[in-house]
Protein backbone atom coordinates (compact mmCIF):
# COMPACT_ATOMS: atom_id res chain seq x y z
CA UNK A 1 0.00 0.00 0.00
CA UNK A 2 1.39 3.45 -0.84
CA UNK A 3 2.21 6.22 1.60
CA UNK A 4 -0.75 8.57 2.07
CA UNK A 5 1.58 11.57 2.31
CA UNK A 6 3.28 10.74 -0.98
CA UNK A 7 0.86 8.99 -3.28
CA UNK A 8 -0.47 11.04 -6.17
CA UNK A 9 -2.49 9.74 -9.12
CA UNK A 10 -1.24 12.36 -11.57
CA UNK A 11 1.30 10.11 -13.38
CA UNK A 12 -1.56 7.76 -14.26
CA UNK A 13 -3.94 10.32 -15.73
CA UNK A 14 -2.39 13.71 -16.36
CA UNK A 15 0.19 15.04 -18.75
CA UNK A 16 1.93 18.37 -18.40
CA UNK A 17 3.65 20.21 -21.23
CA UNK A 18 5.83 23.23 -20.51
CA UNK A 19 6.31 26.40 -22.54
CA UNK A 20 9.20 24.92 -24.51
CA UNK A 21 7.47 21.62 -25.24
CA UNK A 22 9.21 19.76 -22.45
CA UNK A 23 7.19 17.30 -20.45
CA UNK A 24 6.94 17.75 -16.73
CA UNK A 25 5.30 15.53 -14.19
CA UNK A 26 2.74 18.20 -13.37
CA UNK A 27 2.44 21.95 -13.15
CA UNK A 28 3.23 21.97 -9.44
CA UNK A 29 6.83 20.90 -9.61
CA UNK A 30 9.16 22.99 -7.48
CA UNK A 31 11.39 23.38 -10.53
CA UNK A 32 10.05 22.80 -13.99
CA UNK A 33 12.61 21.37 -16.38
CA UNK A 34 12.03 24.17 -18.90
CA UNK A 35 15.27 25.22 -20.57
CA UNK A 36 17.37 22.54 -18.89
CA UNK A 37 19.21 19.64 -20.48
CA UNK A 38 16.35 17.40 -19.40
CA UNK A 39 13.98 19.61 -21.38
CA UNK A 40 15.86 18.80 -24.57
CA UNK A 41 15.48 15.08 -23.94
CA UNK A 42 11.97 14.87 -22.49
CA UNK A 43 10.27 16.97 -25.09
CA UNK A 44 7.26 16.57 -27.33
CA UNK A 45 9.66 17.09 -30.23
CA UNK A 46 11.30 13.76 -29.35
CA UNK A 47 8.46 11.78 -27.88
CA UNK A 48 4.87 11.78 -29.06
CA UNK A 49 2.46 11.65 -26.14
CA UNK A 50 1.78 7.91 -26.46
CA UNK A 51 5.47 7.10 -26.42
CA UNK A 52 6.24 9.37 -23.49
CA UNK A 53 3.37 7.95 -21.47
CA UNK A 54 5.21 4.70 -20.79
CA UNK A 55 8.70 6.21 -20.94
CA UNK A 56 11.33 5.44 -18.36
CA UNK A 57 10.80 8.84 -16.79
CA UNK A 58 7.09 8.41 -16.13
CA UNK A 59 7.49 4.77 -15.13
CA UNK A 60 10.01 5.83 -12.49
CA UNK A 61 7.66 8.53 -11.31
CA UNK A 62 4.81 6.03 -10.88
CA UNK A 63 7.09 3.72 -8.93
CA UNK A 64 8.12 6.60 -6.72
CA UNK A 65 4.53 7.57 -6.05
CA UNK A 66 3.94 4.01 -4.84
CA UNK A 67 6.98 4.15 -2.55
CA UNK A 68 7.85 5.77 0.75
CA UNK A 69 10.32 8.18 -0.84
CA UNK A 70 8.96 11.62 -1.71
CA UNK A 71 10.09 13.29 -4.90
CA UNK A 72 11.91 16.52 -3.94
CA UNK A 73 10.58 18.04 -7.15
CA UNK A 74 7.06 17.83 -5.70
CA UNK A 75 7.91 20.59 -3.24
CA UNK A 76 4.91 22.78 -4.02
CA UNK A 77 2.39 20.15 -2.92
CA UNK A 78 4.58 19.13 0.00
CA UNK A 79 4.61 22.76 1.16
CA UNK A 80 0.85 23.09 0.68
CA UNK A 81 0.27 19.87 2.62
CA UNK A 82 2.53 21.10 5.44
CA UNK A 83 0.35 24.21 5.75
CA UNK A 84 -2.82 22.14 5.83
CA UNK A 85 -3.86 23.68 2.55
CA UNK A 86 -5.55 21.83 -0.29
CA UNK A 87 -2.70 20.76 -2.54
CA UNK A 88 -3.13 19.70 -6.12
CA UNK A 89 -2.10 16.20 -5.07
CA UNK A 90 -5.01 15.99 -2.64
CA UNK A 91 -7.49 17.39 -5.14
CA UNK A 92 -6.35 15.05 -7.89
CA UNK A 93 -6.42 11.99 -5.63
CA UNK A 94 -10.08 12.68 -4.98
CA UNK A 95 -10.69 11.89 -8.66
CA UNK A 96 -9.58 8.35 -7.82
CA UNK A 97 -11.80 8.33 -4.71
CA UNK A 98 -8.75 8.58 -2.46
CA UNK A 99 -9.73 10.52 0.63
CA UNK A 100 -7.16 12.84 2.13
CA UNK A 101 -8.03 12.28 5.77
CA UNK A 102 -7.79 9.35 8.18
CA UNK A 103 -9.58 7.15 5.65
CA UNK A 104 -6.89 7.26 2.98
CA UNK A 105 -5.99 3.60 3.35
CA UNK A 106 -9.55 2.35 3.49
CA UNK A 107 -10.44 4.43 0.47
CA UNK A 108 -7.34 3.07 -1.28
CA UNK A 109 -8.65 -0.45 -0.82
CA UNK A 110 -11.90 0.55 -2.50
CA UNK A 111 -10.54 2.93 -5.12
CA UNK A 112 -11.82 2.13 -8.62
CA UNK A 113 -8.26 2.71 -9.82
CA UNK A 114 -6.42 0.60 -7.33
CA UNK A 115 -5.87 -2.20 -9.84
CA UNK A 116 -4.30 0.26 -12.28
CA UNK A 117 -1.97 1.63 -9.62
CA UNK A 118 -0.96 -1.82 -8.44
CA UNK A 119 -0.39 -2.96 -12.01
CA UNK A 120 2.28 -0.27 -12.31
CA UNK A 121 3.91 -1.33 -9.07
CA UNK A 122 4.38 -4.86 -10.36
CA UNK A 123 5.18 -3.96 -13.97
CA UNK A 124 8.13 -1.63 -13.61
CA UNK A 125 5.97 1.49 -13.64
CA UNK A 126 4.16 0.75 -16.90
CA UNK A 127 0.49 1.65 -16.98
CA UNK A 128 -2.65 0.55 -18.73
CA UNK A 129 -4.23 3.97 -18.17
CA UNK A 130 -4.18 6.79 -20.72
CA UNK A 131 -3.58 10.52 -20.30
CA UNK A 132 -7.02 12.09 -20.14
CA UNK A 133 -6.17 15.28 -18.33
CA UNK A 134 -3.79 17.79 -19.87
CA UNK A 135 -1.97 20.72 -18.34
CA UNK A 136 -0.70 22.72 -21.18
CA UNK A 137 1.42 25.79 -21.66
CA UNK A 138 1.15 27.24 -25.13
CA UNK A 139 4.25 29.36 -24.67
CA UNK A 140 5.81 32.04 -22.51
CA UNK A 141 4.32 35.16 -24.04
CA UNK A 142 2.81 37.35 -21.37
CA UNK A 143 2.14 41.05 -21.19
CA UNK A 144 2.93 41.19 -17.48
CA UNK A 145 6.14 40.64 -15.54
CA UNK A 146 4.89 39.57 -12.13
CA UNK A 147 7.57 39.66 -9.47
CA UNK A 148 6.85 36.17 -8.15
CA UNK A 149 6.51 34.51 -11.54
CA UNK A 150 9.07 32.31 -13.26
CA UNK A 151 11.03 33.90 -16.11
CA UNK A 152 10.16 30.76 -18.06
CA UNK A 153 6.50 31.73 -17.89
CA UNK A 154 6.85 35.34 -19.02
CA UNK A 155 9.34 36.59 -21.52
CA UNK A 156 8.80 40.11 -20.22
CA UNK A 157 9.96 38.99 -16.81
CA UNK A 158 12.75 37.02 -18.45
CA UNK A 159 13.91 40.22 -20.16
CA UNK A 160 14.05 41.96 -16.78
CA UNK A 161 15.93 39.04 -15.25
CA UNK A 162 18.40 39.10 -18.10
CA UNK A 163 18.91 42.86 -17.83
CA UNK A 164 19.68 42.38 -14.15
CA UNK A 165 22.14 39.60 -14.93
CA UNK A 166 20.10 36.98 -13.08
CA UNK A 167 19.75 34.80 -16.17
CA UNK A 168 21.58 34.71 -19.48
CA UNK A 169 18.81 33.72 -21.83
CA UNK A 170 15.48 35.46 -22.41
CA UNK A 171 13.53 34.50 -25.45
CA UNK A 172 10.25 33.28 -26.75
CA UNK A 173 9.86 29.61 -25.89
CA UNK A 174 6.65 28.75 -27.69
CA UNK A 175 6.80 25.12 -28.76
CA UNK A 176 3.46 25.76 -30.44
CA UNK A 177 5.20 27.91 -33.08
CA UNK A 178 6.17 24.68 -34.82
CA UNK A 179 3.18 24.18 -37.11
CA UNK A 180 3.74 20.48 -37.75
CA UNK A 181 4.24 19.76 -34.08
CA UNK A 182 1.15 21.75 -33.24
CA UNK A 183 -0.98 20.00 -35.85
CA UNK A 184 0.17 16.58 -34.63
CA UNK A 185 -0.59 17.51 -31.05
CA UNK A 186 -4.06 18.79 -31.96
CA UNK A 187 -4.74 15.45 -33.66
CA UNK A 188 -3.65 13.69 -30.49
CA UNK A 189 -6.00 15.82 -28.40
CA UNK A 190 -8.93 15.16 -30.72
CA UNK A 191 -8.28 11.42 -30.49
CA UNK A 192 -8.16 11.53 -26.68
CA UNK A 193 -11.03 10.81 -24.30
CA UNK A 194 -10.37 14.17 -22.71
CA UNK A 195 -11.69 14.65 -19.20
CA UNK A 196 -10.02 17.98 -18.59
CA UNK A 197 -7.73 20.41 -20.29
CA UNK A 198 -6.11 23.28 -18.44
CA UNK A 199 -4.18 26.01 -20.20
CA UNK A 200 -1.57 27.86 -18.20
CA UNK A 201 0.57 30.88 -18.88
CA UNK A 202 2.27 32.83 -20.23
CA UNK A 203 -0.98 34.62 -20.69
CA UNK A 204 -3.16 32.24 -22.71
CA UNK A 205 -5.58 34.86 -23.96
CA UNK A 206 -2.89 36.68 -25.98
CA UNK A 207 -1.54 33.49 -27.52
CA UNK A 208 -3.02 32.87 -30.97
CA UNK A 209 -3.07 29.11 -30.35
CA UNK A 210 -5.50 29.59 -27.46
CA UNK A 211 -8.40 30.70 -29.63
CA UNK A 212 -7.38 28.24 -32.35
CA UNK A 213 -7.63 25.43 -29.84
CA UNK A 214 -11.09 26.48 -28.70
CA UNK A 215 -12.20 26.77 -32.33
CA UNK A 216 -10.78 23.32 -33.04
CA UNK A 217 -12.80 21.67 -30.27
CA UNK A 218 -15.98 23.52 -31.17
CA UNK A 219 -15.61 22.75 -34.89
CA UNK A 220 -15.11 19.06 -34.12
CA UNK A 221 -17.93 18.98 -31.60
CA UNK A 222 -15.50 17.80 -28.93
CA UNK A 223 -16.57 19.89 -26.02
CA UNK A 224 -17.68 17.23 -23.58
CA UNK A 225 -14.93 17.87 -21.06
CA UNK A 226 -13.82 20.40 -18.50
CA UNK A 227 -11.90 23.23 -20.10
CA UNK A 228 -10.03 25.67 -17.92
CA UNK A 229 -7.42 28.35 -18.16
CA UNK A 230 -5.70 30.94 -16.04
CA UNK A 231 -5.67 34.57 -17.05
CA UNK A 232 -4.20 37.81 -15.77
CA UNK A 233 -7.64 39.43 -16.21
CA UNK A 234 -6.32 42.28 -18.29
CA UNK A 235 -8.10 41.22 -21.47
CA UNK A 236 -11.63 40.98 -22.74
CA UNK A 237 -13.15 37.54 -23.04
CA UNK A 238 -16.36 38.75 -24.68
CA UNK A 239 -15.63 37.03 -27.99
CA UNK A 240 -15.18 33.67 -26.24
CA UNK A 241 -18.42 33.29 -24.34
CA UNK A 242 -20.51 31.79 -27.15
CA UNK A 243 -17.85 29.17 -27.80
CA UNK A 244 -17.11 28.44 -24.17
CA UNK A 245 -20.82 27.95 -23.57
CA UNK A 246 -20.58 24.76 -25.61
CA UNK A 247 -18.18 23.05 -23.22
CA UNK A 248 -19.31 20.71 -20.49
CA UNK A 249 -17.72 22.94 -17.91
CA UNK A 250 -15.35 25.89 -17.98
CA UNK A 251 -13.27 27.23 -15.15
CA UNK A 252 -11.43 30.50 -15.36
CA UNK A 253 -8.58 30.99 -12.93
CA UNK A 254 -8.14 34.68 -12.25
CA UNK A 255 -4.68 35.62 -11.07
CA UNK A 256 -5.00 38.23 -8.35
CA UNK A 257 -2.57 38.77 -5.49
CA UNK A 258 -4.03 41.73 -3.63
CA UNK A 259 -7.12 43.85 -4.15
CA UNK A 260 -5.43 47.20 -3.72
CA UNK A 261 -2.82 49.24 -5.57
CA UNK A 262 -0.03 46.87 -4.49
CA UNK A 263 -1.32 44.33 -6.99
CA UNK A 264 0.14 46.62 -9.67
CA UNK A 265 3.56 46.33 -8.03
CA UNK A 266 3.32 42.54 -7.82
CA UNK A 267 1.62 41.88 -11.12
CA UNK A 268 3.84 44.38 -12.89
CA UNK A 269 2.21 45.85 -15.97
CA UNK A 270 -1.32 45.36 -14.68
CA UNK A 271 -3.77 47.89 -13.32
CA UNK A 272 -5.95 47.01 -10.36
CA UNK A 273 -8.87 49.14 -11.49
CA UNK A 274 -8.92 47.56 -14.94
CA UNK A 275 -8.53 44.13 -13.40
CA UNK A 276 -11.42 44.51 -10.97
CA UNK A 277 -13.61 46.01 -13.67
CA UNK A 278 -12.82 43.09 -15.97
CA UNK A 279 -13.58 40.54 -13.26
CA UNK A 280 -16.96 42.14 -12.62
CA UNK A 281 -17.64 42.14 -16.36
CA UNK A 282 -16.61 38.49 -16.75
CA UNK A 283 -19.06 37.47 -14.06
CA UNK A 284 -21.84 39.56 -15.48
CA UNK A 285 -21.47 38.26 -19.01
CA UNK A 286 -20.17 34.68 -18.77
CA UNK A 287 -22.45 31.78 -19.67
CA UNK A 288 -23.78 29.57 -16.88
CA UNK A 289 -21.28 26.76 -17.37
CA UNK A 290 -18.38 29.06 -16.51
CA UNK A 291 -17.03 29.00 -12.96
CA UNK A 292 -14.43 31.34 -11.54
CA UNK A 293 -11.65 30.78 -9.08
CA UNK A 294 -9.08 33.25 -7.76
CA UNK A 295 -5.53 31.99 -8.13
CA UNK A 296 -2.90 33.33 -5.80
CA UNK A 297 0.73 32.84 -4.92
CA UNK A 298 1.15 34.30 -1.44
CA UNK A 299 4.66 35.64 -0.88
CA UNK A 300 6.42 37.58 1.84
CA UNK A 301 4.90 40.72 0.29
CA UNK A 302 1.35 39.73 -0.52
CA UNK A 303 0.74 37.82 2.70
CA UNK A 304 0.47 41.27 4.31
CA UNK A 305 -2.71 41.98 2.38
CA UNK A 306 -3.92 38.40 2.11
CA UNK A 307 -6.67 38.64 4.71
CA UNK A 308 -8.14 41.53 2.72
CA UNK A 309 -8.07 39.42 -0.45
CA UNK A 310 -9.75 36.49 1.31
CA UNK A 311 -12.50 38.78 2.61
CA UNK A 312 -12.98 40.12 -0.90
CA UNK A 313 -13.35 36.56 -2.16
CA UNK A 314 -15.97 35.87 0.49
CA UNK A 315 -17.87 39.01 -0.47
CA UNK A 316 -17.78 37.95 -4.11
CA UNK A 317 -18.31 34.22 -3.53
CA UNK A 318 -15.00 33.27 -5.15
CA UNK A 319 -13.06 30.13 -4.36
CA UNK A 320 -9.30 30.49 -3.93
CA UNK A 321 -6.75 28.15 -5.44
CA UNK A 322 -3.41 29.11 -3.96
CA UNK A 323 0.20 28.04 -4.08
CA UNK A 324 2.16 29.52 -1.23
CA UNK A 325 5.43 30.56 -2.82
CA UNK A 326 8.22 28.02 -2.76
CA UNK A 327 10.00 29.40 -5.82
CA UNK A 328 11.44 31.98 -6.09
CA UNK A 329 12.82 30.99 -2.71
CA UNK A 330 13.74 34.62 -2.01
CA UNK A 331 10.06 35.50 -1.84
CA UNK A 332 9.05 32.84 0.65
CA UNK A 333 6.97 34.02 3.59
CA UNK A 334 9.26 32.37 6.12
CA UNK A 335 11.85 35.12 5.50
CA UNK A 336 9.71 37.72 7.26
CA UNK A 337 10.85 38.83 10.73
CA UNK A 338 8.96 37.50 13.72
CA UNK A 339 7.59 40.94 14.56
CA UNK A 340 5.74 41.03 11.23
CA UNK A 341 4.69 37.40 11.56
CA UNK A 342 3.27 38.02 15.03
CA UNK A 343 1.15 40.86 13.71
CA UNK A 344 -0.06 38.65 10.87
CA UNK A 345 -0.78 35.77 13.21
CA UNK A 346 -3.13 37.99 15.20
CA UNK A 347 -4.78 39.22 12.02
CA UNK A 348 -5.32 35.73 10.60
CA UNK A 349 -6.44 34.32 13.93
CA UNK A 350 -9.08 37.03 14.22
CA UNK A 351 -10.17 36.34 10.67
CA UNK A 352 -10.30 32.61 11.35
CA UNK A 353 -12.45 33.17 14.45
CA UNK A 354 -14.84 35.23 12.36
CA UNK A 355 -15.04 32.63 9.61
CA UNK A 356 -15.59 29.80 12.08
CA UNK A 357 -18.43 31.78 13.61
CA UNK A 358 -19.95 32.16 10.15
CA UNK A 359 -19.61 28.41 9.61
CA UNK A 360 -21.12 27.49 12.97
CA UNK A 361 -24.25 26.02 11.49
CA UNK A 362 -22.65 24.49 8.46
CA UNK A 363 -21.94 20.82 8.06
CA UNK A 364 -18.39 19.77 8.78
CA UNK A 365 -16.45 16.92 7.33
CA UNK A 366 -14.94 16.04 4.02
CA UNK A 367 -15.05 18.90 1.56
CA UNK A 368 -14.26 19.37 -2.08
CA UNK A 369 -12.51 22.71 -2.00
CA UNK A 370 -13.38 23.24 -5.66
CA UNK A 371 -17.10 23.02 -5.00
CA UNK A 372 -18.72 26.44 -5.46
CA UNK A 373 -21.12 25.77 -2.61
CA UNK A 374 -18.16 25.37 -0.24
CA UNK A 375 -16.65 28.83 -0.65
CA UNK A 376 -16.71 29.46 3.10
CA UNK A 377 -14.95 26.16 3.78
CA UNK A 378 -12.44 26.87 1.03
CA UNK A 379 -11.66 30.32 2.41
CA UNK A 380 -11.53 29.09 6.00
CA UNK A 381 -8.96 26.56 4.91
CA UNK A 382 -7.10 29.37 3.18
CA UNK A 383 -7.01 31.43 6.37
CA UNK A 384 -5.69 28.40 8.27
CA UNK A 385 -2.97 27.93 5.67
CA UNK A 386 -2.08 31.62 5.85
CA UNK A 387 -1.85 31.35 9.62
CA UNK A 388 0.40 28.31 9.32
CA UNK A 389 2.55 30.11 6.77
CA UNK A 390 3.54 32.79 9.29
CA UNK A 391 4.89 30.36 11.87
CA UNK A 392 7.71 32.02 13.77
CA UNK A 393 11.38 31.39 13.09
CA UNK A 394 13.09 29.81 10.06
CA UNK A 395 14.11 33.21 8.65
CA UNK A 396 17.49 32.43 6.99
CA UNK A 397 19.31 35.81 7.15
CA UNK A 398 21.44 35.08 4.07
CA UNK A 399 18.38 34.42 1.97
CA UNK A 400 16.63 37.46 3.46
CA UNK A 401 19.60 39.61 2.43
CA UNK A 402 19.41 38.14 -1.07
CA UNK A 403 15.70 38.85 -1.15
CA UNK A 404 16.17 42.51 -0.24
CA UNK A 405 18.97 42.89 -2.77
CA UNK A 406 16.81 41.38 -5.51
CA UNK A 407 13.90 43.69 -4.75
CA UNK A 408 16.26 46.67 -4.64
CA UNK A 409 17.69 45.80 -8.04
CA UNK A 410 14.27 45.16 -9.52
CA UNK A 411 12.91 48.41 -8.08
CA UNK A 412 15.83 50.41 -9.36
CA UNK A 413 15.28 49.10 -12.86
CA UNK A 414 11.50 49.59 -12.76
CA UNK A 415 11.52 52.90 -10.90
CA UNK A 416 9.43 51.28 -8.22
CA UNK A 417 9.58 50.98 -4.44
CA UNK A 418 8.72 47.91 -2.46
CA UNK A 419 8.69 49.84 0.84
CA UNK A 420 6.26 52.44 -0.49
CA UNK A 421 3.92 49.65 -1.50
CA UNK A 422 4.48 47.57 1.63
CA UNK A 423 5.31 50.11 4.37
CA UNK A 424 4.84 47.48 7.08
CA UNK A 425 8.06 45.91 5.76
CA UNK A 426 10.14 49.09 5.68
CA UNK A 427 12.16 48.18 8.77
CA UNK A 428 12.82 44.69 7.43
CA UNK A 429 14.00 45.95 4.06
CA UNK A 430 16.11 48.76 5.50
CA UNK A 431 17.75 46.43 8.00
CA UNK A 432 19.18 44.53 5.04
CA UNK A 433 20.34 47.65 3.24
CA UNK A 434 17.44 48.52 0.97
CA UNK B 1 -15.96 -8.06 -2.02
CA UNK B 2 -17.07 -7.56 1.59
CA UNK B 3 -15.95 -4.42 3.36
CA UNK B 4 -16.07 -3.78 7.05
CA UNK B 5 -17.82 -0.47 7.70
CA UNK B 6 -18.17 1.55 10.88
CA UNK B 7 -21.56 3.04 11.75
CA UNK B 8 -22.79 5.29 14.50
CA UNK B 9 -26.52 5.95 14.70
CA UNK B 10 -28.33 8.08 17.27
CA UNK B 11 -32.07 7.79 17.80
CA UNK B 12 -34.16 9.93 20.11
CA UNK B 13 -37.59 9.06 21.52
CA UNK B 14 -40.55 11.37 21.92
CA UNK B 15 -42.88 10.09 24.65
CA UNK B 16 -44.51 10.69 27.99
CA UNK B 17 -45.58 8.82 31.15
CA UNK B 18 -45.64 5.14 30.11
CA UNK B 19 -46.08 5.92 26.47
CA UNK B 20 -42.70 5.47 24.77
CA UNK B 21 -41.90 4.19 21.30
CA UNK B 22 -40.99 0.62 20.39
CA UNK B 23 -38.37 0.67 17.69
CA UNK B 24 -35.83 -1.42 15.85
CA UNK B 25 -32.57 -0.72 14.07
CA UNK B 26 -31.38 -2.90 11.21
CA UNK B 27 -28.72 -3.00 8.53
CA UNK B 28 -30.49 -4.81 5.72
CA UNK B 29 -32.08 -7.73 7.57
CA UNK B 30 -29.54 -7.79 10.39
CA UNK B 31 -31.12 -6.56 13.58
CA UNK B 32 -28.82 -4.37 15.65
CA UNK B 33 -31.26 -3.60 18.47
CA UNK B 34 -34.96 -3.34 19.23
CA UNK B 35 -37.27 -2.63 22.13
CA UNK B 36 -38.65 0.31 24.02
CA UNK B 37 -36.79 3.57 23.58
CA UNK B 38 -36.79 5.60 26.80
CA UNK B 39 -33.93 7.89 26.14
CA UNK B 40 -31.63 9.01 23.36
CA UNK B 41 -29.27 6.22 22.40
CA UNK B 42 -26.23 6.00 20.17
CA UNK B 43 -25.36 2.69 18.56
CA UNK B 44 -21.79 2.18 17.45
CA UNK B 45 -21.25 -0.95 15.44
CA UNK B 46 -19.57 -2.32 12.36
CA UNK B 47 -20.86 -4.54 9.59
CA UNK B 48 -19.31 -6.52 6.75
CA UNK B 49 -21.14 -5.50 3.61
CA UNK B 50 -20.74 -6.95 0.14
CA UNK B 51 -20.47 -4.51 -2.79
CA UNK B 52 -23.96 -3.41 -3.71
CA UNK B 53 -26.97 -1.68 -2.24
CA UNK B 54 -27.79 -1.78 1.48
CA UNK B 55 -30.26 -0.13 3.81
CA UNK B 56 -29.98 1.34 7.25
CA UNK B 57 -33.46 0.96 8.70
CA UNK B 58 -35.11 2.45 11.76
CA UNK B 59 -38.59 1.10 12.49
CA UNK B 60 -41.34 2.42 14.76
CA UNK B 61 -44.04 -0.10 15.73
CA UNK B 62 -46.33 0.75 18.63
CA UNK B 63 -48.14 4.00 17.98
CA UNK B 64 -51.91 4.29 18.28
CA UNK B 65 -54.13 7.29 17.74
CA UNK B 66 -54.50 7.56 21.50
CA UNK B 67 -50.79 8.29 21.89
CA UNK B 68 -51.30 11.75 20.45
CA UNK B 69 -52.91 13.96 23.08
CA UNK B 70 -54.47 17.17 21.85
CA UNK B 71 -55.74 20.08 23.92
CA UNK B 72 -57.32 23.05 22.20
CA UNK B 73 -55.97 21.89 18.84
CA UNK B 74 -52.45 21.74 20.24
CA UNK B 75 -50.53 18.50 20.61
CA UNK B 76 -49.47 18.37 24.24
CA UNK B 77 -48.11 14.80 24.28
CA UNK B 78 -47.03 12.49 21.51
CA UNK B 79 -45.05 9.40 20.70
CA UNK B 80 -42.42 9.37 17.95
CA UNK B 81 -38.87 8.42 16.99
CA UNK B 82 -36.32 10.86 15.66
CA UNK B 83 -33.29 9.70 13.70
CA UNK B 84 -30.94 12.20 15.22
CA UNK B 85 -27.50 11.46 13.76
CA UNK B 86 -25.87 9.05 11.36
CA UNK B 87 -22.18 8.61 10.96
CA UNK B 88 -20.62 6.32 8.35
CA UNK B 89 -16.88 5.70 8.53
CA UNK B 90 -16.65 8.72 10.82
CA UNK B 91 -18.46 11.08 8.44
CA UNK B 92 -21.49 12.67 9.98
CA UNK B 93 -23.16 14.53 7.16
CA UNK B 94 -26.51 16.10 7.94
CA UNK B 95 -27.42 15.15 4.41
CA UNK B 96 -27.67 11.50 5.49
CA UNK B 97 -30.74 12.31 7.57
CA UNK B 98 -32.65 13.87 4.69
CA UNK B 99 -31.43 11.37 2.12
CA UNK B 100 -33.29 8.69 4.09
CA UNK B 101 -36.93 8.03 3.21
CA UNK B 102 -39.68 7.62 5.82
CA UNK B 103 -42.46 5.17 4.89
CA UNK B 104 -45.29 5.50 7.44
CA UNK B 105 -47.82 2.70 7.08
CA UNK B 106 -50.82 3.87 5.09
CA UNK B 107 -49.47 7.37 4.55
CA UNK B 108 -47.31 9.22 2.06
CA UNK B 109 -43.57 8.73 2.27
CA UNK B 110 -41.31 11.70 2.82
CA UNK B 111 -37.70 12.65 3.49
CA UNK B 112 -38.37 13.45 7.13
CA UNK B 113 -36.21 11.98 9.88
CA UNK B 114 -39.11 12.43 12.34
CA UNK B 115 -41.10 9.18 12.56
CA UNK B 116 -44.51 10.31 13.75
CA UNK B 117 -46.38 7.12 12.84
CA UNK B 118 -45.61 3.42 12.64
CA UNK B 119 -43.41 2.59 9.71
CA UNK B 120 -39.80 2.54 8.59
CA UNK B 121 -37.18 5.12 7.88
CA UNK B 122 -34.60 3.78 5.46
CA UNK B 123 -31.30 5.17 4.20
CA UNK B 124 -30.07 3.41 1.09
CA UNK B 125 -26.30 3.29 0.75
CA UNK B 126 -24.11 1.57 -1.76
CA UNK B 127 -20.71 0.02 -1.36
CA UNK B 128 -17.87 0.66 -2.17
CA UNK B 129 -18.84 3.24 0.40
CA UNK B 130 -16.21 5.84 -0.46
CA UNK B 131 -17.48 6.10 -4.01
CA UNK B 132 -20.99 6.57 -2.61
CA UNK B 133 -19.75 9.23 -0.19
CA UNK B 134 -17.86 10.91 -3.02
CA UNK B 135 -20.93 11.03 -5.22
CA UNK B 136 -23.53 11.96 -2.64
CA UNK B 137 -21.39 14.66 -1.06
CA UNK B 138 -20.49 16.15 -4.44
CA UNK B 139 -16.75 15.76 -4.10
CA UNK B 140 -16.18 16.31 -7.79
CA UNK B 141 -15.83 13.98 -10.71
CA UNK B 142 -14.15 10.60 -10.75
CA UNK B 143 -11.99 9.31 -13.56
CA UNK B 144 -13.78 6.45 -15.24
CA UNK B 145 -12.55 3.07 -14.14
CA UNK B 146 -11.35 1.91 -17.52
CA UNK B 147 -9.58 4.97 -18.84
Image (spheres, coloured by chain):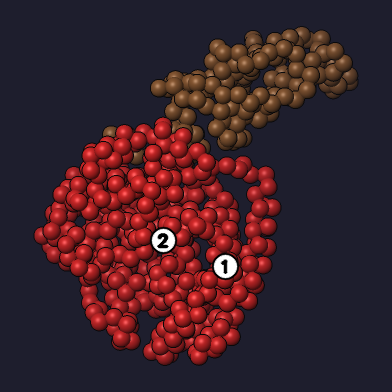
Chain colours: A red, B brown
> In x, y percent, where is residue B24?
66, 14
What residue is at 58 percent from the left and 77 percent from the top?
Answer: A337
Q: Which label belongs to residue A390? A: 1
Q: Are marks 1 and 2 in contact (CB under 8 Å)?
A: no
Please say if A316 is above or below A163: above
Mark sitting earlier along the chain (1/2): 2
Please say if A49 is above or below B71: below
- Residue A192 appears left or right of A264: left
Q: Chain of mark 1?
A: A
- Residue A11 appears left or right of B81: left
> In x, y percent, where is residue B16?
85, 18
The answer to whether one can see residue A161 in this image is yes
Furthest residue in direction left, as rendered: A180
The answer to whether one can see residue A286 in this image is no
Q: Chain of mark 2?
A: A
- Judging depth in this view, the residue of A270 and B39 nearest the camera is B39
Q: How crowded is the residue under tag 1: few (<14 C-alpha within 10 Å), some, or many (20+)?
A: many
Q: Which label belongs to residue A76? A: 2
Please say if A201 is above or below B92: below
Amino acid sequence: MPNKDIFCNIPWYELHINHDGSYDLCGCMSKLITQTEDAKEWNIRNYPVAEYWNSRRLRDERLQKMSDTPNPACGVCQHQDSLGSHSKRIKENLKSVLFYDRNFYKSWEQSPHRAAFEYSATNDGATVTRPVSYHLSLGNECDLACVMCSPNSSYKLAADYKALGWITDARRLNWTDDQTLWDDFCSTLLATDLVSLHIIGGEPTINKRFRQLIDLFVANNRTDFSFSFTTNCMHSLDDLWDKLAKFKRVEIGMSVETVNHTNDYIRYGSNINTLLTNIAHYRATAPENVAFVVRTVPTLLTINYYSQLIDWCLDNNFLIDSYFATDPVWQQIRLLPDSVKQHLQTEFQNQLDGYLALAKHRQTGLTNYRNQSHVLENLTSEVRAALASVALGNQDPDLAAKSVLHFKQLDTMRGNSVVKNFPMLQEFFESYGY
Amino acid sequence: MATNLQFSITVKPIGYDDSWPEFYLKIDNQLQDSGKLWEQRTYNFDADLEDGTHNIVVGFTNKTDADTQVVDDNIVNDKAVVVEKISIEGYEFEDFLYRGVYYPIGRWHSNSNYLSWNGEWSLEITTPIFTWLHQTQHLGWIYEKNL
